[in-house]
């Protein structure tokens, strides 16, 4: 039997890094994908040393339309069996009405929705053939709560919820489980990267959950074949 690997996008920090840590702790080998090769290599080395798993890094920008095919090629060249797919890469994104460069909008859609669909398209059929697979598409409670302003982030996450629900209905009988993870406010570097620290610092601390709790909920949920996992009792 081939060794099982988890392919994790956006793995260099935040929820992606926490997914890598928890899966490595369970003995799952890793393919780590993100733009920052130096941070990926540091994480890959640390997890290999701590847990004795095999790790590969695949630097890629999922806002680039060629990235999903390149990632699949990377795995096929090394004969890596991907049994876990964690689509975690994401950004806060542009304002649909205020930011007038359509190329920026299109790159956001590519990163947040199209790359996730393509990676599912490329990796899930082989999981179905083998009779085992676990797919987590990281969405957000923002997918369920419309708000004014931006008009991009919540709708993109709503697509991931709908995609995950239909995929799970389609493939669950074959042994492949697909879940949309919907975290609420989570302690990661997301808000700092997005320039949202003033917002975060002005919010009550009880609204926030730690990344290890959110990821633990996601792994339990996908193992149970729950199509949507809303992390945190509050949410």
Image (cartoon, grey):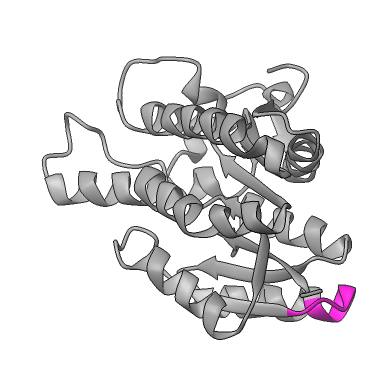
Indicate whether 111 appears above or below 233: below
Total marks placed: 0
- Residue at the (76%, 79%) spot, across then down: 54
Name the spot of residue 193 as percent of width and height, x first: 47, 51
> 202 or 62, which lies in front?
62
In the shown orientation, is residue 171 left or right of residue 220? Answer: left
Farthest residue in the bottom direction? 77
Indicate whether 47 appears above or below 93: below
- Image quarter for residue 217? top right
Within the magenta stretch, is there residue 53? yes
In the shown orientation, is residue 158 left or right of residue 187? Answer: left
Name the spot of residue 9 as percent of width and height, x first: 54, 59
- Residue at the (80%, 33%) spot, across then down: 224
Name the spot of residue 70 as percent of width and height, x first: 41, 73
- Image quarter for residue 226? top right
- Residue at the (35%, 47%) spot, across then down: 114
Name the spot of residue 22 as percent of width and height, x first: 81, 56
* On-image quarter of the N terminus: bottom right
- Image quarter for residue 5? bottom right
- Residue at the (61%, 34%) spot, across then down: 168
The boundaries of the magenta stretch are: 48-54
Indicate whether 112 appears above or below 41: above
Within the magenta stretch, is there residue 226? no
> 209 or 218, which lies in front?
218
* On-image quarter of the C terminus: top right
């Amino acid at each position: 039997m081939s060794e099982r690997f988890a392919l994790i996008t956006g793995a260099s920090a935040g929820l992606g890094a926490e997914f890598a840590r928890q899966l490595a702790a369970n003995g799952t080998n890793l393919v780590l994908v993100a733009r920052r090769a130096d941070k990926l290599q540091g994480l890959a080395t640390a997890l290999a040393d701590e847990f004795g798993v095999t790790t590969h890094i695949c630097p890629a920008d999922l806002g680039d339309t060629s990235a999903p095919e390149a990632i699949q090629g990377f795995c096929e060249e090394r004969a890596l069996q991907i049994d876990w797919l964690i689509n975690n890469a994401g950004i806060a994104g542009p304002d649909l009405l205020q930011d007038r460069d359509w190329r920026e909008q299109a790159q956001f859609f590519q990163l947040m929705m199209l790359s996730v669909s393509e990676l599912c398209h490329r990796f899930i059929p082989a999981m179905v053939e083998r009779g085992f697979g676990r797919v987590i598409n990281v969405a957000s409670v923002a997918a369920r709560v419309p708000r004014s302003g931006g008009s991009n982030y919540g709708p993109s996450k709503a697509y991931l919820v709908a995609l995950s629900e239909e995929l799970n209905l389609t493939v669950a009988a074959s042994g492949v489980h697909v879940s949309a993870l919907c975290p609420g406010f989570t302690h990661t570097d997301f808000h700092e990267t997005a320039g949202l620290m003033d917002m975060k610092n002005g919010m009550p601390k009880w609204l926030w959950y730690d990344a290890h709790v959110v990821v633990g909920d996601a792994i339990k949920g996908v193992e149970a074949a729950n199509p949507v996992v809303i992390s945190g009792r509050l949410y």
